[in-house]
């Protein structure tokens, strides 16, 4: 299993204002912080003018209501698993940045005309990772593990150490044993139960941007 060694810069922000201020009144800002990393149309415009390259990530996740995200994204696991019948449903590294300086002042200026802009003013930056691995044989599908961890940018070092820990656990995991355990459990299986089999307490750790 090979992981992407890419590292984000946690010290950046969105400070350059938009040249076309009509966007502040018209651009879509629905579902702010929908999944923490999917950017609204107005956010995307700020990221672009601030020099960030956005990715249109095709969403392969089984539990997503959208077919793609516009976000800062990097693939995490770069090669498929060697274990037979084990497949990566999705894996990724993500980051968002807060508004600052003239860009933040521009948003504040238009809040009286569009109150929802206050959400963007208050957005915090965050970084995180997501991975889901399945066992598939014939028509049988077992979700082996699904982890989503978010951290505030102020805790970037914690993000790095946790990411490295999860990478070590994924490399050393006995997927066949995990599959057998899940196959023989008769109670409702939770994501935390799957995470425990891998060696972590929680499957999902969220950091709200608002």
Image (tube, grey):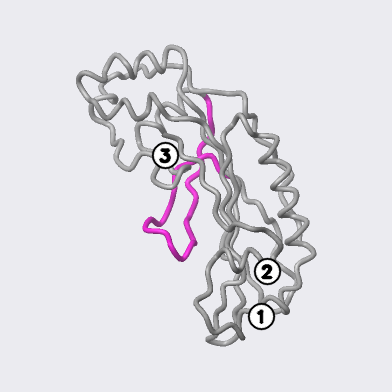
Element type at marker 2?
helix
Q: Which residue is mark 2?
A: 197
Quarter in which the C terminus is drawn: top left
Labels 3, 2: front one: 2
Task: Measure the C-alpha gap from mark 3 to mark 2.
Answer: 33 Å
Which of disc 1 and disc 2 is earlier in sequence?
A: 1
Element type at marker 3?
loop
Question: On the rendered structure, is 173 left or right of 150?
Answer: right
Instruction: Tell me residue 122's x, y (percent).
Output: 40, 26
Quarter in which the N terminus is drawn: bottom right
Rendered residue at 49%/61% (across/down): 60
Residue 139 located within the stretch drawn in magenta = no
Rendered residue at 70%/46% (across/down): 162
Disc 2 vs disc 1: Cβ atoms closer than 8 Å?
A: yes
Q: Which residue is mark 3?
A: 39
Instruction: Tell me residue 85's x, y (percent).
Output: 66, 79
Rendered residue at 72%/79% (across/down): 176
Q: Which residue is mark 1?
A: 181
Element type at marker 1?
helix
């Amino acid at each position: 299993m090979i992981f992407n060694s890419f590292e984000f810069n946690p010290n950046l922000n969105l400070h350059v204002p938009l040249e076309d201020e009509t966007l502040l009144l018209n651009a879509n800002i629905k579902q702010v912080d929908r999944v923490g990393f999917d950017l609204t149309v107005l956010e995307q415009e700020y990221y672009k003018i601030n020099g960030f390259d956005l990715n249109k990530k095709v969403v392969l996740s089984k539990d997503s209501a959208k077919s793609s995200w516009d976000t800062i994204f990097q693939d995490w696991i770069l090669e498929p698993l060697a274990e037979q019948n084990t497949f990566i449903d999705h894996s990724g590294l993500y980051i968002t940045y807060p508004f600052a300086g003239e860009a933040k002042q521009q948003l504040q200026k238009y809040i009286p005309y569009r109150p929802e802009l206050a959400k963007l003013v208050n957005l915090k930056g965050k970084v995180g990772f997501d991975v889901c691995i399945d066992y598939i044989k014939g028509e049988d599908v077992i979700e082996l593990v699904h982890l989503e961890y978010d951290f505030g940018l102020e805790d970037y070092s914690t993000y790095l150490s946790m990411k490295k820990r999860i990478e070590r656990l994924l490399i050393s995991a006995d997927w066949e044993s995990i599959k057998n355990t899940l196959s023989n459990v008769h109670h409702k299986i939770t994501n935390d139960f799957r995470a425990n089999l891998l060696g972590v307490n929680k499957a999902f750790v969220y950091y709200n941007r608002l």
